[in-house]
Image (cartoon, rainbow, N blue to C red):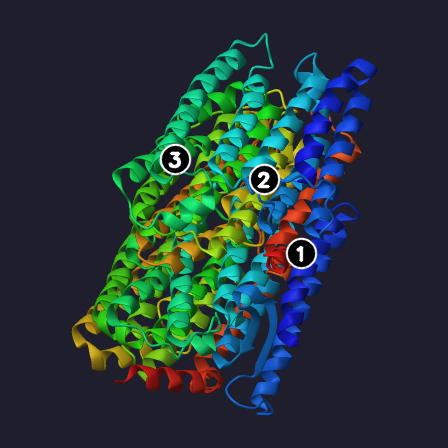
Amino acid sequence: MTLIWIIAIFFAGGLLCWAAQFVNRVLIKWIALIAAVANLALVGAAYAEYRNGSAPGDWLIDYTVNWIPSFAIKFHIALDGLSLVLLLLTAFLGVLAVLCSWKEIKERVGFYYFNLLWTLAGITGVFVAMDLFLFYFFWEVMIVPMYFLIAIWGDSNRRYASYKFFIFTQAGGLLMLVSILALFFINHANTGNYTFDFFELQNITLSVAEGRWIMLGFLVAFVIKLPAVPFHSWLPDAHSEAPTAGSLILAGLLLKTGAYGIMRFVITLFPQNSAEIAQWAMLVGVIGIIYGAMLAFAQNDLKRFIAYTSVSHMGFILLGVYSFREMAFDGVVMQMLTHGISTGALFAMAGMIKERLHTREMGNMGGLWTGMPLMGGLALLFAMASLGLPMMGNFIAEFLILVGAYEVNPTLTIIASIGLVFAALYSLRMMQRVFFGPRTTPDRHPEPFLRQGELREGSAHSASAVYDLSAREFTILISLSVAIVILGLFPQPVLDSVNTVVQSLIQKNTP
Amino acid sequence: MNALVLSAIWGVIMMFSGIITSRLKVVRVVAVLGIIVLLLSTIMELNGTKFFGFNLNGMLVFDTFSLLFNSVIFFCVLIYFLLSGKDIEKVGMNVPDYYALLFFVLAGVTMASSFNTLLMLFLGIEIISIPLYILTGSDKRNLKSNEASLKYFLMGSFSTGLMLMGIALIYGAKASFNLDVIGGTTTELTPMVSAGLLLLLFSMAFKVSAAPFHFWTPDVYDGAPGVFTSFMATIVKAAAFIAFIRLFRGGFTEVHAKWQLIVAIITAATLFIGNITAVFQQSVKRMLAYSSISQAGFMMFAIVSLGDAALEGLLYYAAAYCLATIGVFAILVRMKDYTYDGFNGMGKHHPAIAAANTVFMLSLAGIPATAGFMAKFYMLSVAINAGKLLWLVIIGILCAAVSVYYYFRVIQAMYFKDGEKQEIETGPGFKLLLGITAGFIIFLGIFPQWLIEKLYFFL
């Protein structure tokens, strides 16, 4: 029941927020915060239960109820170790996303939190849905509100970015739908049994050609979301135009749904076909690592910079998953978590800087450390995390992936490790341009990011109103830093919880 | 049977209501009353109560499928009258006549959905078409409306000619108009039968505005008064589809494999042309005309696959599509500016209407949790189940992704662009009804079982 509560709280919280708009505007934020915190507590409780070992079997929670019986569609949600750690991430970043938006959002607040919470509900659903139709349903539920988040509260180029985001993901999603339907009918032809249930479909036998096409349908949807290189072009636009919380959720959670989908569905349902394309997938991953890093290095826009680092980091996921090694799988899960946290933190900081300077141009920043020593220190921490310094979680993740992949394909792995060097380059360059160097007081610029007739806080006084972190901002960043350090020092609990999942993946994928 | 007789009678009543009273409100109430009577009588017939016991010699068969379709359609017309009734009154002077013509169309719809001989098909389609020619030109002082009417008339009679020709050829080959006889004896295609089949196919494709017989649609839909466009694009189109599938299921199931490819190509072309052209429209009304073509493309999936599930799917699709489109048009006809810019800032000035319109657009675009998604899902699943047509499904999917662009453009205009406040005449009743329609669409999207069970129960 916990899972249903989590999803229901997000949905209901969203509706309440929208309704509260007509009653009391202060109430809205608190409703959203309470909903997010309540869910964090619920997921935390589930995790504690899991750690105590009181949960039986692989599946901690398994709940099924008929939904559309004439299509054999069931509302089937279940929770295992992998889903659990991702739910923890979702709930955690959910709270932070609400906190991030506390002051940034000034118009249509109720509708904003409605969309925010519904996106989170969709993501939660994606992580726990075990009925393929339900999975598709949540997959779509997550992108429609995200579209609104970008399109209404985004920056100047928000319309273009939101369109691009939506059409890319929608096209991928529909291809996945075709694949799901194909599985449904092939399974019926084989067994005479109509079902969308993931557990039952796992036993399906497909001819090689069938499997290949059906797998591609799934894979395209997931690599668009991930994103892997030829499909990544929506990401920089969407990330940089979205409001802070939007970027946080996009980078922290939405990208993970792609990685999750590959792990959960693609390599589980199509082990043979996955093995077929493994080398190509690893190659695409490595291209993503290098290409993303190079583009990140060349960016002047802070948020676009972070977006491209995401492309680079997500390349590791493909590399790791398709090497089919235990270590690499562990690394992939770690990468999902740590990337969510570190990139989320970077986006949060970019948002905070933008609130102060009203710009994302790194050229207009510089020497911010003197004005904001606290933020500077924390930014340095996350820049180090992003470049893979030991003691931060990202190091563990990328190290595990590289070690795992090396056995399979040394050449690609070596090229991928060069990506780490690039990561050091771009991260340090970013630190240098934003926080170090002479203090450049930005011009009293025309505020290009404000819409007509809209006044934001701080715009009335001088644009160089650089002030250090407020208590709320400090809370956000410090909790993220604690999380990333803990993951770096004690990754074992995470690895323990996904152990059974990884083992079964290994079993499926070793011929 | 109940509905056929009653709708014809009610058409006459509507004509005379104009003589008895000059108060438009009374006329409207009588019309709404009429549609409620039609709806109830159809539901009663579903449960076995027949008012009229004529011997039809098997020319019309009121089976559960046609009755179910009729009740869905009458329900949609009820919503249509309630939402757009006031706008019908603004078209011109002869309001009672418009209502009368609409009821005559409904008589045609009941015939077209329950025919069992080709003659009744012809009659049904003609009874639908002729009042529509008049309604299209009902805005007499508007040049575009006149042009549309003439165009529709010429093209429509041409396609009816094709249909008659096809019927004649089939009759020549089978010596019968009866669908059962034709279906029972058509096991292979002789030249005469195939010529007849093709002519019927083309004329039906014309009526449902499938490519390449769609050219009349944008002009006619654009030129006709908005309220009647709404009626044509929904009720009439759905009826034409039911006639289409009835004709081909009844008559040519045995040779399905032989004509399937042609229909599949027509479907692909319809999807492609409808969606791509819709992207480039500047007027929302014209966009909706092309959108109706692309939606027709999806409904064509039912004809392509022709199974039992296809029947259900077509019913579900018709309901989902009609509700959403009627809703959108109800809003559109009350606006002065039919371009996308006309929608600018609606989210701010008319939040309730904008929210409902968003639901309609999402449903048309086929986003989950709306009825439109389940409808598309139905169609895709019947096509995949039919096998061999994966290429068509992929084209359908890609076109659905394209359609997101133009439907979301309206949403974007409403919420993300600032605009002058447009005067839209709305009362609380109108808003409430829009809200109910939108709610119903979401309900059907989340609990499709409700309607499907109804279908199963009767089918």
Residue indicated by mark 1: A14
Residue A88: image quadrant is bottom right
Q: Nearer the viewer, mark 1 or mark 2?
A: 2
Q: At 60% from the left edge and 15% from the top edge, which residue is drawn?
A: B138
- Residue B287 can be seen, yes or no: yes
Q: Is residue A122 above or below residue B80?
A: below
Residue A255: percent from left, percent from top: 43, 62
Which chain letter goes with mark 3?
Answer: B
Crowding near the residue tagged with mark 3, few <14, some 14–19, many ≥20 C-alpha atoms within 10 Å: some
Q: At 40% from the left edge and 52% from the top edge, which residue is drawn?
A: B305
Distance CA(mark 1)–CA(mark 3): 62 Å
Q: In this view, does B193 lie to the left or right of A108?
A: left
Residue indicated by mark 3: B171
Which chain letter goes with mark 1?
Answer: A
Residue A230, disc: none
Q: Which of marks 1 and 3 is in front?
A: 3
Distance CA(mark 1)–CA(mark 2): 30 Å
Foreground residue, B261 or B158? Answer: B158
Q: What residue type is labelled 1?
A: Gly
Are circles 2 and 3 on residues that touch, CB within 8 Å? no
Foreground residue, A272 or B128? Answer: B128
- Residue A438 can be seen, yes or no: no
Residue indicated by mark 2: B322
Q: In this view, does A334 lie above or below A376?
A: below
Q: At 52% from the left edge and 18% from the top edge, which residue is drawn?
A: B223
Residue A43: percent from left, percent from top: 61, 75
